[in-house]
Amino acid sequence: MKLLFKQRFFSWFDSYDIYDEYGNTVFTVEGQLSWGHKLRILDRTGRHVGTVKEVVLTFLPRFELFVNGKCIGSLSKELTFFRPSYTLDFNGWDVSGNFMEWDYSITDRSGCKIAVISKELWNWTDTYTIDVNRDTDALYALMVTLAIDAEKCSRD
């Protein structure tokens, strides 16, 4: 499954539309006023299915991930020098990026690719392509992308 992640151009808070390869809206993301980033994910029917919430006052950035109101784990940035790296404490996934922080891959414990995240350049707003191997992992890959984008925005 391929998802196109596109930030809305005019918005007071982080808000995104996520489309499939046919241009259909799959998810909508709404930012909420809070201390740190808090992003609510809605499915195509408008039902709240997930939340990405930044944990503040930590040495390295960390985001808690919620599905249907239950915390399923967190994504933490690792201390690295040349390539960004994140650890997910659920599903045994690892996230690593390239030097320019435009492309990321999510792999499982055995090194198999779960998803590839690519930032598209030359757009007015943040735009990513998320190529997920299994449809059942699409929400989780989206949550990882949201956390990475929020962490990068916090540094800018």
Image (cartoon, grey):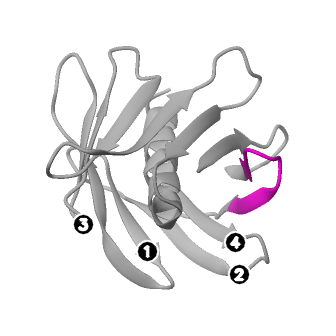
Counting other residues with Cα less than 10 Å from the Cα at mark 4, is it few (<14), some (14-19), or many (20 or more)?
some
State the residue position of label 1. Answer: 66
Q: Amino acid at mark 4?
A: Asp
Is residue 137 or residue 121 the one in the foreground?
Answer: 137
Q: Which secondary structure lies at badge 1?
A: strand
Who comes first in sequence, dot 2 or dot 3? Answer: 2
The chief SS type of the magenta part is: strand
State the residue position of label 3. Answer: 90
Is residue 57 or residue 101 the one in the foreground?
Answer: 101
Image spot of residue 143 (x, y percent): 48, 57
In the image, taking residue 16 as reference, residue 64 lies left or right, namely left
- Marker disc for residue 47: 2
Please say if 95 is above or below 81.
below
- Marker disc for residue 43: 4
- Could you tell me how far apart the alpha carbons at marks 2 and 3 are, in whole angstroms? 23 Å
Q: Amino acid at mark 2?
A: Arg
Q: Which secondary structure lies at badge 3?
A: loop
Who comes first in sequence, dot 1 or dot 2? Answer: 2
- Could you tell me how far apart the alpha carbons at marks 4 and 1 are, in whole angstroms? 14 Å
Q: Amino acid at mark 3?
A: Phe
Who comes first in sequence, dot 1 or dot 3? Answer: 1
The residue segment tinted magenta is 19-29
Q: Are marks 2 and 4 in contact (CB under 8 Å)?
A: yes
Which residue lies at the image location 48% right of the left edge and 85% below the top edge?
Answer: 69
Who comes first in sequence, dot 4 or dot 3? Answer: 4
Q: Which secondary structure lies at badge 4?
A: strand
Q: How many marks?
A: 4
Counting other residues with Cα less than 10 Å from the Cα at mark 1, is it few (<14), some (14-19), or many (20 or more)?
many
Q: Amino acid at mark 1?
A: Phe
Is residue 139 or residue 74 the one in the foreground?
Answer: 139
- Could you tell me how far apart the alpha carbons at marks 2 and 4 are, in whole angstroms? 5 Å
Asked if residue 9 lies in the magenta stretch, the reply is no
